[in-house]
Image: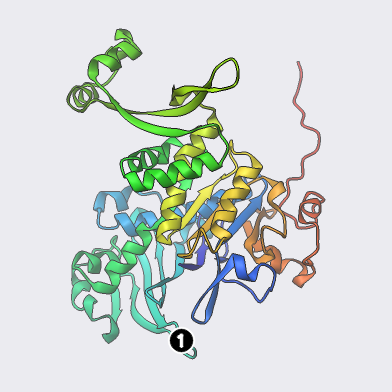
Amino acid sequence: MLVNFRVENFKSFKDFTEFSMEATKLKKLKESNTFKMHNISLLKSAVVYGANASGKSNLKNAMSYMKRVVEMSLDNNFMKNYPHTPFLLNSESENRPSFFEIEFIIDEIFFRYGFAIEKEGLIYQETLYQKKLQANSREVLLFKREKNSFLIKPAFKEGKKLDEKTRPNVLFLSVVAQFNGTISTKILSWFEKFHIISNISHRDFQEFSFKMLEDKAFKEKMVSLIKSADVGIHDIEKKVLLFDEVAQKIGQDALREVPKDVLQDIEKNGLSTIETIHLQYDKNGNFHKLRPFELELESEGTKKFLALSAPILDTLLNGEILLIDELDNSLHTELVRAIIKLFNSKESNPNHAQLIFTTHDTNLLDQELFRRDQIWFTEKDIYGATDLYSLVEYGKGSARNDLVLEKNYLDGKFGAKPHIGSLAFEVD
């Protein structure tokens, strides 16, 4: 479970910034939208609003950057070439390291892990702490690193002498995991279960959804979810087209443009494709037969929901974390609302999965759907730096439980709203 995420000097985040999934003492929707892990109360979902270019996507980018570095740290070429992207609108910050820190729970142990990174992937600082989820438990340092100087505590015996094998542009955590360290391996596995996707391009995660159709039990759940979305689909079928079928379908001219290695793969394995199955009726309105549709005949919204269905289900079933940038892109408000309710429900989310997403859809600003501590805003100051804050922090609690959130947000009372006059351009 994700508890807190912190970032400093990354893209539009100039100053130390914290995003939290810790529930406050609000009583609103406590039974449905929060869950307890011993002495910590956590949120099942959170939403981030903000004007275009205010930095809400950079929150996703910051989390993605940290995850990517943790997963790819052992690749020397990757680390050297992975861009260091500090806040560039300040002469001091552009030469400083970027800092990332995350707090999470694995097997009822609370971990705090962070690192600071410079140009060419050089690790400036790295720390790992842990504590038990019990009242009065103390946080224990496992290791601390300042550039190439390491302090490895007895509680992290799996890291003993491995500092000697750690290059300046490699995370110590990744090195220890490579040598099968128990704690470090668990942490890397946790990052793998932190799924981050952009709903603007559904093709990035479409392959995963269609791969999961091969699992019969999972497919049944996918189809049930999709049918409940009222998009007119009765079933989904994955089929393999033989090479001659592909050639006939796209034509010889298009076939010549396909790379040679791709053609060889199609000749050997065929081409996997998806058909959606619809109910066809006769002129009297009676069921006639099942009619397959090529996927491209479906609307953009339907295709995106199909692509999202497996990540959503996989996250819910395994109690993982899903971050989606622009969740509302091409999806109807009621469908997005239904997705949120899946995560906020005890019945459909018994394993405490967490959903975080960005959106422009103000229809979702509803205190019957979200608690105030689940709603976040991003806003840029006059220097181009992003400020991230939750609604529960706004006005020192002056936002009441009965406040109409959408109207007040559109009226500019919470900030994080673009200041747009009349759009204009020069006419010759």
Q: How is the image coloured?
A: rainbow
Pinpoint residue 262: horizontal percent, then vertical percent. 24, 25
Q: Residues within 10 Å of mark 1 (few under 14, many from 20)?
A: some
Dividing the image into 4 quarters, which one contains the N terminus?
bottom left
Residue at 50 percent of width and 53 percent of height: 323
**Residue placed furthest toward the bottom:** 136
Visible in this render: residue 73?
Answer: yes
Question: Would you identify the image quadrant in which residue 157 lies?
Answer: bottom left
Q: How many marks can you see?
A: 1
Relative to 370, 273 lies left or right: left
Q: Position of residue 216 (x, y in %)?
A: 33, 44
Screen quadrant of the C terminus: top right
Amino acid type at mark 1: Gln
The residue pinned by badge 1 equals 134
Residue 331: image location, x then y, percent? 59, 38
Q: Secondary structure at mark 1?
A: loop
Q: Nearer the viewer, residue 271 or 338?
A: 338
Which of 163/199 is in front?
199
- Position of residue 28 relative to residue 265, above or below, is below
Q: Which one is nearer the viewer's eye here, 377 or 307?
A: 307
Tell me which residue sits at (51%, 49%) in the image: 324
- Indicate whether 235 appears above or below 260: below
Q: Is residue 175 left or right of residue 28?
A: left
Residue sitting at x 29%, y 77%: 150
Relative to 30, say whether 289 is above or below: above
Q: Is residue 148 visible?
A: no
